[in-house]
Every structure is written in C-alpha cells, then in structure tokens.
Image (spheres, rainbow, N blue to C red):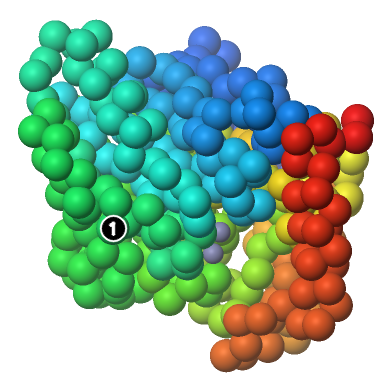
Amino acid sequence: MKLRLLTLLCLPLISFAARAQFTDPNGGDLERGVLPQAWMTGGPKCMEIPEWQVHEYNPDLYILRQSGCTDAEMPFLYLFFGKDRGLLWDTGSRNGNLAPALQHVVHNWLERNHRASIPVIVTHSHSHEDHVWGDSAIRALNDPAIPIIFVPAKVADTQVFFHIASWPDGLGEVDLGERVLNIVPIPGHDIVSIALYDRRTGILLTGDSLYPGRLYIPDFASFQASTERLIRFIEGKPVAHVLGNHIEQTRTPFLDFPIGSIYHPDEHALDLTFGTLLELEDGLKSMNGTPRRLAMRDFTIWPLSPGDHGLGAKMEEIYKQTQEKQLRDKWDQPK
Ligand SMILES: [Zn+2]
Ligand SMILES: [Zn+2]
C-alpha cells in the first residue's frame, strides 16, 4: 500500500522529468547564441535608426528587425545558414527595402566562410502583408552570389516545398546541409501559418501565432487545434527560445503599446519559452470553446469575429491617433 502511494506520488515528477532534456545544466548539445538586451525600435530620433537592425545570434543565424521609422509593424526576420543553403523567414513589411540589408549579411557571411555563393530559400511564417511586402524585390534580386529559391506564402506551395503529406496534420522539413529545420503547419492566425524548429539551436519560430503582443485569431478552432499539435510536436525536444514576428508588449506585465506605435521605449524581450506556449494552451482551454479576449502577462489572446480581419472602429481610432502623434514626432520623440 505504502509502495503504491509512493509510486502515485512520483508520477507527476516522472512526467515532468520527461520534459527535461539534459541531465546537466551545461547547455546540452545545442548550438549557442545570444540575443540583444534591447532592440532598436523607431527612435527617439529616426535619423539615427537604420532601416534594418542586423543581430548575429551566432555565425550561422541572423535576426533582422525592421525599424519602426519605416513601418509600425516592425517585424523580425530570421536568416539561417546551412552548409549548402540559407533560409530566410519572411521579407518584411511596408517600406522595408530589405534587399540591400539581405545582400550585406549574405555577402559578409560568404566572405567569412570563404565562399563565392549560396542559394537562399525564401519562405514565410504566413501570408499577411507585413511579412510578404518585400517578396517582389527579393524575387527580382539579380545577385549571382545569392540565387533565390522562392516559396510563395500559399498552402499548396508550402506543402510541396517542405514535403508536408497532409495539411495541417502532417509535418515537413528542409535540410540546409547539416542543418535540418522542421516545419509544423499551425493555421488559425492565417490559413498558411507555419512554425519552424531549428534542431541545431533549439529555436522555435512561431510567427504571429505566439509573440509578446496581440495574438489576433480569426479562426479560433483551428488556432486551438494548431497550438495542441505544436505542443505535441515539440514535447521531448529542447526549446532554447520561442521567437515570434513582432513585439507589442512593454516590459510592464499585462501592458501593451498602443496599436500603430512606431517607437517602443522599454520594450518586452523578444524571447518566450516552452512555458509561454503552455500558458497559451491554458488560456485557450479556459474559454471552453467560447472565444474571448484575454490579457495574459506577456501576450493577449485576441479572437476576431469569423471572416472579419478588421480590428474594429475603436482600434482603428487608436491606430490613427498614435500614428499621427508619433509620426509628427519621428525626428525627436519625447523621452
Ligand atoms: Zn499576421
Ligand atoms: Zn504580423
């Protein structure tokens, strides 16, 4: 009896241990990298802010962040390098002018690695305008050092390129040359949303489906099912960081920047964790199938009415007012 009780008491510990990935806190076999303490956003002086901030996570992974001085969406892009190919995740938002920044990074990588050229796969977290705006310029890039392999942000093309047998239940992958990236379809925010897991660094990219900000959900049932599938896929794998496409939260818990902000002083960190993904799952479950807005510490679950991609009159007004004020002050934002 006592033994049985002890066994029962140990069960939660056993299932918890199944999630721990390494026996010692020595970094495991993951390739390491660093994230910046803070990102440039849009100021205080737009004259000082580059169109794209390039951050070296490590020599084979770069994070590019678009300046708020060019567009309030300020998306993050990710550029992975393998032995044979590179992969770019998204092409930026309006007025992004990505091509020169991309060429700068790839040419420097080639010089560093004593190479003449490397093909780059261009793929997307999803199809919204703030992530595909730079597509035409990148497709038109005529640089013999960077042959572009372009994957349109459409379900059929994504499925074929990553060999996803069934959508959204199947899994896909691509090998960049000693660097395998796993792809998980996660529709809900958009019909063609995908997540990407990099086995080398343990980084999980979640696009607009999980980031420190407002998670807009036009298709709640699909979004919840996708969150469950993503958790099932990632369980048992080490997760170094969960990285999304935007930051809209401040460092103050439960507080976001007004929609339309181009300047984010005291911005929340980009990186979230596997725990944040479980928190998202928990928040969705708590609604028992009846979607409602729910502000969590680091993000907000924001269901939209089915088929309606607009954010409503109140948000439109906040957007307009914030943009007017911050664009007027873009050369010298009040501190
Ligand atoms: Zn989106
Ligand atoms: Zn977005």
Position of residue 224 in the picture relative to residue 180 (left or right):
right
- The image shows residue 61 at horizontal and vertical percentages of 38, 26
Q: Residue at x 48, y 72 (%)?
A: 190
- The image shows residue 302 at horizontal and vertical percentages of 73, 71
- The image shows residue 114 at horizontal and vertical percentages of 14, 9
Q: Is residue 136 above or below residue 269?
A: below
Q: Residue at x 11, y 15 (%)?
A: 115
Q: Quadrant of residue 34?
A: top right
Position of residue 112 in the picture relative to residue 245 (left or right):
left
Position of residue 198 in the picture relative to residue 250 (left or right):
left
Q: Is residue 300 visible?
A: no
Q: Residue at x 88, y 44 (%)?
A: 253
Closer to us: 100 or 16: 100
- The image shows residue 27 at horizontal and vertical percentages of 50, 15
Q: Residue at x 89, y 40 (%)?
A: 252
Ligand 2: does it lie within 8 Å of the C-beta at label 1? Answer: no
Residue type (three-letter) at the residue carrying disc 1: Ser
Q: Is residue 41 visible?
A: yes
Closer to us: 119 or 125: 119
| Residue ID for mark 1 | 136
The quarter of the picture where the C terminus appears is top right
Tally of numbered discs = 1
Q: Is residue 175 above or below residue 300?
A: above
Q: Is residue 118 above or below residue 301?
A: above
Closer to us: 66 or 208: 66
Q: Secondary structure at mark 1?
A: helix
Closer to us: 187 or 80: 80
Q: Is residue 58 above or below residue 213?
A: above
Question: Alpha-carbon neighbours of circle 1 within 10 Å: few (<14), some, or many (≥20)?
Answer: few
Q: Quadrant of ligand 1?
A: bottom right
Position of residue 123 in the picture relative to residue 150 (left or right):
right
